[in-house]
């Protein structure tokens, strides 16, 4: 705990003190930009043959974009419901790891966690991790989560309703919004050689395994890049602590 | 009916993993290796998702207009453009390349 407070104090001192308004602005930037891309999901889902209620139920209750896209894609391709749900589930597993990280930063009361859980996704995690203090992290998480949830569901509805009018969403380049969002979230995380090595290895695994493994599994396999890099990092800078299970972050 | 089954399973599964992450006992997170791993996992997943959603069509690897769009997003990021502009650059360039390519 003392260590964490020191880290926070150093971060706050090193960076210019972030005002609450600045945090809100950053969070709204992410929430609005990604929230608007719900229209792409609404259109895609409707185009995949799902009904309005089904499309909206996914955005309201699943609320994790990659899983939603994976599910409607698998259903459109004629996959059985269990395979389709498994692919979406595998993609959603990453949110457990985000939650692992967020619960440290946000220190939420237990009673709040079941409600906060629905907002534990890529974008809220990225915004929260970027904040120097717990107060800023909580503001960032809440504002990103709320704005994104409201807009994502609204634009999903509009997208599903307007699917016919819009025609081919790919012609509008909307299928590039997803990867651009992921890249924008990833970029600030690539601070050290280890992070960049993890990203590079994950890209190789994710693309290399894509043709041979079921949908959703290559992303999980790519996640193995993290422990692999961690072990490599431990060996490189391990010194005498090489054999210790906890001795991987001493340089920090 | 099958569609609703798939939707129901996905809702339950995705919510369960989200909640599980928040409910893991704090003691398990005090180990530096776990903390470091939790920090590196999003890096791996986001990198893989970026690559897959740019360079794949189903199970096939492809190089199409989305690559140009992602390139534009990368340039925007290097220029420290705001988030919305980064996404807009990707969408506009992808649509533009498709329009030119027919």
Image (cartoon, rainbow, N blue to C red):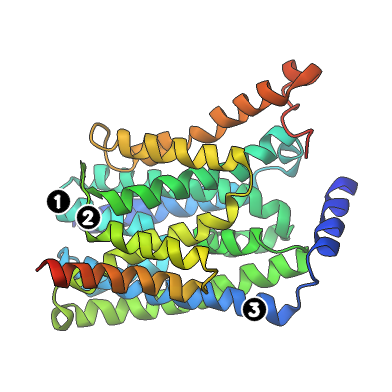
Q: Earlier in the sequence, mark 2 or mark 3?
A: 3
> Are circles 1 and 3 on residues that touch, CB within 8 Å?
no
- Residue name at image x 66 percent, y 21 percent: A235
How far apart, in angstroms, are the residues tagged by discs 1 and 3?
40 Å
* Mark positioned earlier in the residue sequence (1 or 3): 3
Label 3 sits on residue: A24
**Depicted A198 relative to depicted B83: above or below:** above
How busy is the neighbourhood of tag 1: few (under 14 within 10 Å), some, or many (20 plus)?
Answer: few
Location of residue A188 in the rendering, given as x and y in whole percent from the top left corner: 58, 57
Inter-mark Cα distance, 2 to 1: 6 Å
Instruction: Tell me if label 2 and label 1 are in contact, CB under 8 Å.
Output: yes
The mark closer to the camera, 2 or 3, is 3
Residues at marks 2 and 1 on the same chain: yes
Give how far across and how far down residue A213 sits, in percent.
Answer: 27, 33
The residue to which callout 1 is attached is: A77
Q: Tell me whether marks 2 and 3 sit on the same chain.
A: yes
Q: Choose top left, top right, bottom left or bottom right for residue A113.
A: bottom right
Q: Please identify the quadrant where the N terminus of chain B is shown.
A: bottom left
The reply to whether label 1 and label 3 mark residues of one chain is yes
What quarter of the picture does the C terminus of chain B occupy?
Answer: bottom left
Q: Which residue was labeled with disc 2?
A: A73
Res. B62 visible in picture = yes
Which of the two residues, A170 or A143, is positioned nearer the viewer here? A170
Q: Residue at x 43, y 37 (%)?
A: A222
Q: Nearer the viewer, residue A238 or B28?
A: A238
Circle 2/circle 3 CB separation < 8 Å: no
């Amino acid at each position: 705990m003392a260590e964490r407070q020191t880290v926070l104090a150093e971060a706050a001192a090193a960076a210019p003190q972030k005002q609450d308004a600045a945090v809100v602005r950053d969070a709204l930037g992410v929430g609005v930009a990604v929230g608007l891309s719900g229209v792409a999901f609404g259109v895609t889902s409707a185009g995949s043959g799902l009904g309005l209620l089904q499309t909206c139920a996914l955005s309201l209750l699943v609320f994790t974009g990659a899983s939603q896209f994976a599910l409607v894609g698998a259903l459109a391709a004629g996959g059985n419901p269990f395979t389709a749900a498994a692919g979406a589930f595998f993609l959603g597993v990453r949110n457990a790891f985000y939650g692992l990280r967020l619960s440290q930063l946000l220190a939420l009361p237990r009673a709040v966690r079941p409600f906060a859980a629905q907002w534990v996704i890529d974008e809220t995690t990225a915004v929260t991790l970027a904040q120097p203090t717990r107060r800023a992290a909580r503001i960032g998480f809440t504002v990103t989560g709320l704005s994104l949830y409201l807009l994502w569901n609204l634009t999903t509805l509009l997208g599903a309703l307007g699917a016919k009018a819009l025609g081919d969403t790919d012609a509008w380049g909307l299928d590039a919004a997803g990867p651009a969002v992921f890249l924008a979230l990833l970029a600030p995380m690539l601070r050290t050689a280890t992070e960049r090595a993890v990203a590079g290895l994950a890209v190789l695994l994710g693309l290399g395994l894509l043709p041979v493994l079921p949908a959703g599994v290559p992303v999980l396999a790519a996640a193995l890049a993290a422990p692999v890099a961690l072990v490599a990092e431990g060996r490189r800078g391990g010194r005498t602590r090489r054999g210790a299970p906890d001795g991987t972050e001493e340089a920090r | 009916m099958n569609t609703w089954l798939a939707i129901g399973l996905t809702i339950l599964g995705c919510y369960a993993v989200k909640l599980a992450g928040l409910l893991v006992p704090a003691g398990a997170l005090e180990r530096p290796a776990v903390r470091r791993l939790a920090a590196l996992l999003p890096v791996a997943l986001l990198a893989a998702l970026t690559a897959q959603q740019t360079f794949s069509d189903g199970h096939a690897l492809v190089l199409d207009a989305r690559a140009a769009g992602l390139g534009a997003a990368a340039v925007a990021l290097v220029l420290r453009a705001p988030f919305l502009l980064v996404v807009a650059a990707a969408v506009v360039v992808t649509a533009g390349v498709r329009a030119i390519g027919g």
